[in-house]
Image: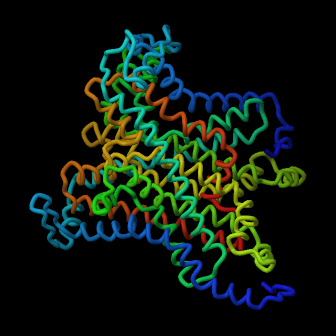
Amino acid sequence: MASPQLGKAAAKQRRHWDRKWIPYALLAPALITIFVIILSPLATTIYYSFSNIDLIRDRTTFVGLDNYVELFGSRLFWKAVEVNLKFAAIVVTVPTLIGLFFALLLVENFTGRSIGRTLLILPWALPWIVVGLLWNWVVNAQFGALNGLLYSLGLIEKYIPFMADEDLALIFTALASAWRQTSFSAILLLAALQTIPEDLYDAAKVDGAGMRARFRFITFAWLRPTLTIVLLYNVVLGFLQFDAVWIMTQGGPGDATMLISVLLYRYTFINFDLGMGAAVSNVLGLITMGVGLIFVRLIYRSQATYA
Amino acid sequence: MAAIGGRVRKSGIIRKIATYLAFCCLLFWVGFPVYYMLITSIMRAPDLGAKPPHWIPPEPTADNYREVLIGKAGEAGGYGSTTEFTRMMPALLNSTFVSVAVVLSNLLIGGMAAYAFSRFDFRLARAAYFGILMTRVLPALSLIVPLFVILRKLKLVNTLGALILTYTIFILPLTIWILREYFDTLARDIEEMALIDGATRWQAFRMVVAPLAVPGIIAVGVMSFMEAWSEFFFALTLTNSLTYPPLLMSFRNLHQVNWNALAAATVIGVIPPVVIAFVFQRYLVRGLSEGAVKG
């Protein structure tokens, strides 16, 4: 930062003085609001998870690890974990694979490509609650689009109540989430694909690389960092999804679509057991923080190589 | 966009066919659920659920939209219709107000913080940056109970202020992250030069840094609009369904759902985010990918 022909020492002086407090002043609104709205509730939630909260008598008693012991000993919790793992498996794989497929398609040169690219944004632009509703129309037993389609094609005689079946309910709620997330994944992958220098392919062709080799060593290699990020996003969604599942099934039938987030909602807002709700929150938080840590580390690494 | 001519050169007819088959998959994947909602919204109730289903509405009607917008249906209405729908217009106005306010406050607070991270070396900068980014992966769901208590103390429960405040904070990490990237792309030297020429920091920011960050600012603005417009859970728990998404949920929960009117309500409510997404498509894609992947 050698500043040439700097005549005004005073200006320099002032800047040095500036530097001390200006960044803190600039950060203050962000840090204060984050503290009030996120960090202090976070601390409270952690405290709640070690407490028994009696809402009627308005009494909070410290109970140590009781909530966690009860949680890890409950059938309900492990059911939610099992459901959530299955759900996440679909929400991670389907958007990544179909997203990659669409991204590879939309980087091709063909008439209709720009329509395709615009259309791709559409699911991402819809609120989760709308995505849930949309899929309600798809799977509905009386007038659902999927039933209608299968019927029109002559594949079924009468409409199937998809959401009454436990396995199908889980698959379809996961597909609804996957539907929107596919667009997000494809948008990211497409953006990365567009940055691949054309010469790489030409050079590889000159070197006699076939289509498979070119895909593996150029396209795929180039996409790898983006794919990692996409996977992480999808994992986080797999564990944090609530809206779309809630409007579709509210966790049912039975507990078939009871994700950990749905269990959290049930404890907190239906049973009003805030201590248990907080314990579930923290377990869920730890899972996503774990993923998040990997995520932030990767970003720091890419930043280090960039700088 | 960069033409990928080189790769299509080899294009046999097979490749063309495969491309268009894949394109049809895309059209079906995205279009099928959306199309079905659209036709439901202009169908009369008795036509919904006919066997075989109508893929083109036999008697298109605007009654469903009428019911949602002015709370009164035509002759085909009255089936499961409800006063709930009269809350639709206020909810849409609330959603608009909240979203616009979130965009502005988020750009202001986030922009300031991003500028601080980009331009100053100060103690704890790294820790603060890391901490802010981490808040992005916290399950918002898990903070709701203490948050409710805090907002009640601030007398903000069941106000739009509660939503503006929480949405702004939850989108901040992304904003700070993306804007910082944009600020970083401008060499400090250029800004230094403006300062040496006697500009104040604010002038230097406004005339040198901000113009270069315009694409980032638009991207962040659009994304925070979408997030604020779409948010469901806080609006459900912190307010009495003041905005559009929780209201949609309460329609859904009515004993006798008028599915056609619900479809119309859904369509109306997604127009703003969809139009914005399409208009700002380019910025959005850039912002999304920079926000997610980084250079």
Q: As rendered, which of A28 and A286 lies closer to the eye?
A: A28
Can you give x and y, in whole percent of width and height, for residue A224 in the image? 65, 58
Q: Is residue A17 among the parts visible in the rendering?
A: yes
Q: Quadrant of the C terminus of chain A?
A: bottom right
Task: Work out which residue is located at the far left of the displayed protein and give it.
Answer: A57
Number of numbered labels in the structure image? 0
Query: In the rendered view, does A116 fall on the left or right side of A31?
Result: right
Task: Give the answer, above or below, for where B193 lies relative to B95.
Answer: below
Task: Give the answer, above or below, for where B114 lies relative to B222.
Answer: below
Q: As rendered, which of A56 and A188 lies closer to the eye?
A: A56
The image quarter containing residue A277 is bottom left
Can you give x and y, in whole percent of width and height, for residue B191 in the image? 76, 73
Give the residue at x 34% y 31%: B251
The image quarter containing residue A228 is bottom right
Q: In which quarter of the image is the N terminus of chain A?
A: bottom right
Q: As rendered, which of B32 and B246 lies closer to the eye?
A: B246
The image quarter containing residue B151 is bottom left
Can you give x and y, in whole percent of width and height, for residue A203 in the image? 88, 54
Query: In the rendered view, does B82 fall on the left or right side of A304?
Result: left
Q: Is residue A172 among the parts visible in the rendering?
A: no
Give the residue at x 56% y 32%: B29
Task: Give the answer, above or below, for where A236 lies relative to B65.
Answer: below
**Color encoding of the figure:** rainbow
Query: In the rendered view, does A64 fall on the left or right side of B107?
Result: left
Can you give x and y, in whole percent of width and height, for residue A221 in the image? 70, 57
Give the residue at x 62% y 52%: B288
